[in-house]
Image (cartoon, rainbow, N blue to C red):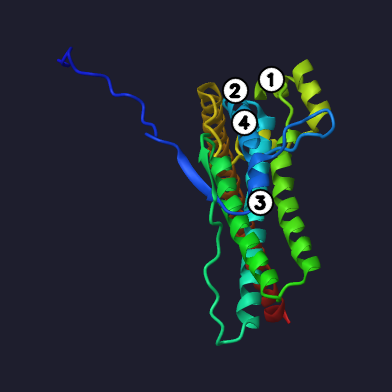
Amino acid sequence: MADSNSQKMAAIGAKQDIEIELATRPALRLWQGREKTQKRHGILGLPGFCKIVRGIEQAVREDDPYADYHYHRIEQAIDDLTFDLDSELKDIQSFIDENIPPAMRLPDIGSKNPVVVPIRFASRLGFQLVYQLLKVDQIVLKVLLANHIGLLPNKEKFETLARVEKRVRSVLHMVFSYRHTGVTRDDMAANNQKAQKAKELMGDLEVGYLEGTTRSDNAPPLPMKRLQTMGKALEKGKAENKSKAAAKEANSSSEDELGAELDRVLKQADEEMTRSAKKKVATA
């Protein structure tokens, strides 16, 4: 019997915020974004991105196939961004290493007063972008160093910084492609008014997203009702495959019997022709 005085375990959570240090203005701009004013349009920052992603994650839990699709698409874009930024960082480091004289020793560079920002969101995609933001910080530092010591002209410096910042923003802005309609996979199967509205806003979806079989490994779990439906469909598919295999085996067996019978008839005909030929020779 359980002890009535035992205390319930509390939910697991961080005792304090995760923090990151940003040393450069481009990285800080990507983090902060910009508030909308009457004179200037707003620019989405990383916290704003994560806020929208949390809405997409909730829609995934509610069985919205479009949310599943866009979550997966954003994750794939972050993977591509990771590859691009790794290449940028490797290129600028190789450029510096190849052009400085062997007798020159470069110091470590950084900000004397970096900006410390807390991470207060629980989003896997958000954290994946945080890693890329810190990588941008390193790229910018190395570009500024190469420019400072006369290896990189101003024009190339500004072009590199603009290219990197634009590349990150292209991923941040992908969240705007999703529109919440409250549609579910059942709605899509019925092609009702919600489904038609979703199609008008975001187009058609591949079968894998409609069925829930194509999705990100990091996406929130599907609702239990959908998992049960998918399980029944899987069992039905296994039963149909088993039935097809049995029918194929039966057909194969019938074909084998027919082939054997045909071989027997042909063999008998050959024997009769051989006997007839021998009789003709004997008569002659």
Instruction: Estimate the spatial distance between the alpha carbons at disc 3 and disc 1, rounded to whole Å.
Output: 39 Å
The residue that mark 3 highlights is 25
- Badge 2 or badge 1: first in the primary sequence: 2
Element type at marker 4? helix
Instruction: Estimate the spatial distance between the alpha carbons at disc 2 and disc 1, rounded to whole Å.
Output: 8 Å
Q: Residue at x 80, y 33 (%)?
A: 203
Q: Pointer 2 and pointer 1: residues touching (CB < 8 Å)?
A: yes
Which of the 4 quarters of the picture holds residue 147?
bottom right
The residue that mark 1 highlights is 182
Which of 126 and 48 lies nearest the eye of the viewer? 48
Q: Residues within 10 Å of mark 1 (few under 14, many from 20)?
A: some
Give the answer, above or below, for where 273 lies relative to 38. Answer: below
The image quadrant where one finds the C terminus is bottom right
Q: Amino acid at mark 1?
A: Gly
Residue extending farthest front: 112
Q: Nearer the viewer, mark 2 or mark 4?
A: 4
Which of 201 and 169 lies nearest the eye of the viewer? 169
The image quadrant where one finds the N terminus is top left
Which of the 4 quarters of the picture holds residue 144?
bottom right
Residue 259 shows in the view:
no
Which of 227 and 72 lies nearest the eye of the viewer? 72
Q: Pointer 3 and pointer 1: residues touching (CB < 8 Å)?
A: no
Residue 165 horizontal/vertical position (percent): 72, 52
Q: Residue at x 76, y 57 (%)?
A: 163
